[in-house]
Amino acid sequence: MSQDTRQDNKDSVVRAVHLKKTYFLDGVAVPALKEVNLGIAKGSFVSITGASGSGKTTFMNILGCLDKPTEGSYYLEGTDVSSLTPDRLADIRNERIGFIFQNFNLLARTSAMENVELPLVYAGVARHERQKKARELLEMMGLKGFEQHFPQQLSGGQQQRVAIARALVNSPSIILADEPTGNLDSKTSYEIMAILTRLNEQMGVTIILVTHEHDIAGYAQRIITFRDGLVVSDTVNK
């Protein structure tokens, strides 16, 4: 492994330094992350994998500013976000991080266009501007003509495309994809992974993918494996 050189790379969009996370259950300390040191370069496509309970989800939550480390630091584009206030973390989530979830997490009573616009609404972007950007992204996702459809009127694959468009709408620093193919059939899974690969290769989008599926992890340029709260493998995928 070459974690030491990667973590010293100040140009990393994501950098974890001596990162630890401990939960307390009935007064008993349960370490979820024991000592994580790694960096992820801008424009990378990285898979984070490991069995249930390995620490990969905890790590993803910290990267997404949904949780804080117990010890150590997490730098996003050079800013230590480990000790920021909840309000500032919420701003960073909306401004710098795009999320793609297994369950799509679309608002059921809101159209595809409005779902994509949502981060821009929170950012205070004017209506005509956010509609223009949302329409362009939906077209890029192959969903022209579906702008006013509600999630229940869309297939699983179409819903995930809406979710990808929403993740991109704020031009985030990183895209965090948490089991993005977990609720999709094999054919649709490959279509979604082809979209993510294209976004990375053609647009330079930094993608960090959490998955337990080896074939899905194989789309990434780099595969990081967690076990018992530690990084046990960090390899370049040729």
Image: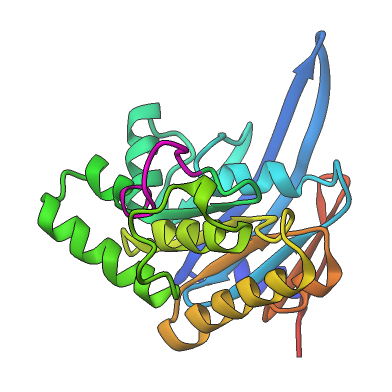
Q: Residue 40, relative to residue 162: is it above or below? A: below
* Residue 128 in the image, given as x and y percentages of width and height: 11, 57
Q: Nearer the viewer, residue 165 or 74?
A: 165
Magenta residues (range): 106-115
At x 35%, y 74%, the residue is 139
Please identify the quarter of the rendering in which residue 177 is found: bottom right
Q: Residue 105, relative to residue 194: is it above or below? A: above
Q: Which colour scheme is used?
A: rainbow
Q: Tell me: 214 left or right of 182.
A: right
80 within the magenta span: no
Residue 198 seen in the figure: yes
* Residue 234 in the image, given as x and y percentages of width and height: 78, 71
* Residue 91 in the image, given as x and y percentages of width and height: 32, 40
Q: Main secondary structure of the magenta part?
A: loop
At x 49%, y 39%, the residue is 82
At x 40%, y 45%, the residue is 93
Please identify the quarter of the rendering in which residue 68 is found: top right
The C terminus sits in image quarter? bottom right
